[in-house]
Amino acid sequence: MGDKWQGEIVKMLHNYNIHTRSHPPLKHLEGWGVADPASPDIVGGNAKTILIEIKTGDLNSFPFSKWKEHQREWARNIRIQSGIEYWLAIVIPMNEIVQAVKRVAFLIPYPVMLKLEELIRPFQNSVPFRLNKAHLLLMRDQGLDMEQLLDMFRLDWVPRTGWVIPKTHSFYWMYLRHNTSYLYKHPEERDAIFDKMMLQEDSNGN
């Protein structure tokens, strides 16, 4: 099922000349138009198929329960069967009293989302955008929030343009620079690269 911010994400992709089909969701990549609630909100591509599931978080956080088990299974299977990467576009509404922006957005690959959940679940069932004094001291010491762990997967907002993919974002160099040395790697090899990126970011932030 499409998310309320789907139009913004589709517009972003179109700005980069990435073709998309998003209504209805697809049961199989070769079965365009066959509805399946487990499949991602957006299927598109240029040199390679692109799969994006869009989620809206709660105020200043994202509950992991919003990514349903049947969606996880679909993502896991498609990566095993075809090697195609699966992304989550997560939009977090912000408290405008605290933040000047109304929302922030991240474009996160499947293995990074799993790693994020693995880090946060021992403490709570949602990941905060930004830690505050209400969170456990151990979480604050380890920098366990989206702002610190996922900075390299964050999208930029540009007035009158919308969401922009930074040139440092892995999505940019995979699909827009057509880095085939990465794009066609086996999913397990990509997982190791993403894991290294997260660990590097975590060590830089602490």
Image: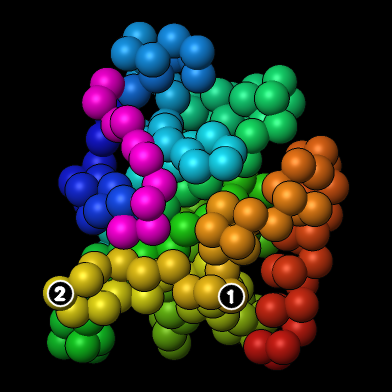
Instruction: Specify whether 85 is left or right of 33.
Output: right
Task: Find disc 2 in the rendering and name its residue.
Answer: 160
In which quadrant is the C terminus drawn? bottom right
Amino acid type, mark 1: Thr
**Disc 2 and disc 1 in contact, CB within 8 angstroms:** no
Q: Quadrant of residue 169?
A: bottom right
Q: Main secondary structure of the magenta part?
A: loop
Q: Position of residue 81 (x, y in %)?
A: 71, 20
Instruction: Specify whether 190 is left or right of 20.
Output: right
Q: CA distance from mark 2 to mark 1?
A: 22 Å
Q: Name the residue: 43% across, 85% down.
A: 132
Judged from the image, the secondary structure of the residue bearing numbered disc 2 is loop
Q: Name the residue: 39% across, 58% down.
A: 16
Task: Find disc 1 in the rendering and name its residue.
Answer: 168
Instruction: Specify whether 164 is left or right of 158.
Output: right
Above or below residue 101? Residue 105 is: above
Q: Point out the tag, 2 or 1, that comes first from the N-terminus.
A: 2
Amino acid type, mark 2: Arg
Above or below residue 203? Residue 163 is: above
Q: Name the residue: 37% across, 75% down.
A: 156
Most foreground residue, 184 or 114: 184
Which range of residues does the magenta coloring cover?
A: 15-24
- Asked whether residue 201 is in view, the answer is yes
Q: Position of residue 135 (x, y in %)?
A: 48, 77
Q: Name the residue: 32% across, 31% down.
A: 21
Q: Position of residue 201 (x, y in %)?
A: 69, 79
